[in-house]
Amino acid sequence: MQAASESDGGSPVFVLLLCCFLVMGVVQVVRPQLLWKANSRLQRGWVRNPEASEPTSKGYAMNRVVGVIFLGFVIWMLVQQF
């Protein structure tokens, strides 16, 4: 008999969502500029010059640190599913 708290495997949708987060985390660590370029279009109505709001090299370094922490969390969640 299996305890209620034990999992019999992860939900396929949840695992797929975690895999998407994993890809986003890898992009954030490897090329954070791509995420900024993708999201800078959302600033067009609110910021006068979106290109001027691009992060500095220290800002990108901080994005990479946060991306590594995020990747660790996502990988931990994926391991917990199996």
Image (cartoon, rainbow, N blue to C red):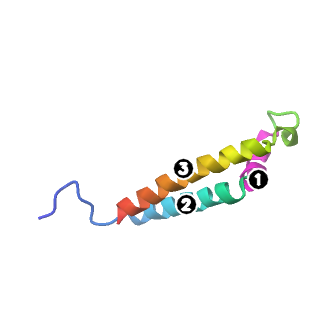
Farthest left residue? Answer: 1
Residue 52 circle label: none
Give how far apart the Cα atoms at labels 1 and 3 are.
18 Å
Closer to viewer: mark 2 or mark 3: 3
From the image, tell me which residue sits under label 2: 22
| Callout 2 amino acid | Leu
Magenta span covers which residues? 34-44
From the image, tell me which residue sits under label 1: 33
Rendered residue at 81%/42% (across/down): 54
Q: How many marks?
A: 3
Residue 69 circle label: 3
Q: Secondary structure at mark 3?
A: helix
Q: Position of residue 27 (x, y in %)?
A: 66, 59
Closer to viewer: mark 1 or mark 3: 3
Name the image quarter holding the N terminus.
Answer: bottom left
Q: Is residue 16 left or right of residue 23?
A: left
Q: Is residue 7 left or right of residue 32?
A: left
Give how far apart the Cα atoms at labels 1 and 2 are.
17 Å
| Callout 1 amino acid | Gln
| Callout 3 amino acid | Ile
Which of the marked residues, 2 or 3, is nearer the chain's N terminus?
A: 2
Q: Is residue 11 magenta?
A: no
Would you place residue 28 above or below residue 9 in this image?
A: above
Q: Secondary structure at mark 2?
A: helix
Rendered residue at 16%/58% (across/down): 3
Give how far apart the Cα atoms at labels 2 and 3 are.
11 Å
Callout 2–callout 3 Cβ contact below 8 Å = no
Rendered residue at 36%/62% (across/down): 81
Q: Is residue 8 left or right of residue 53?
A: left
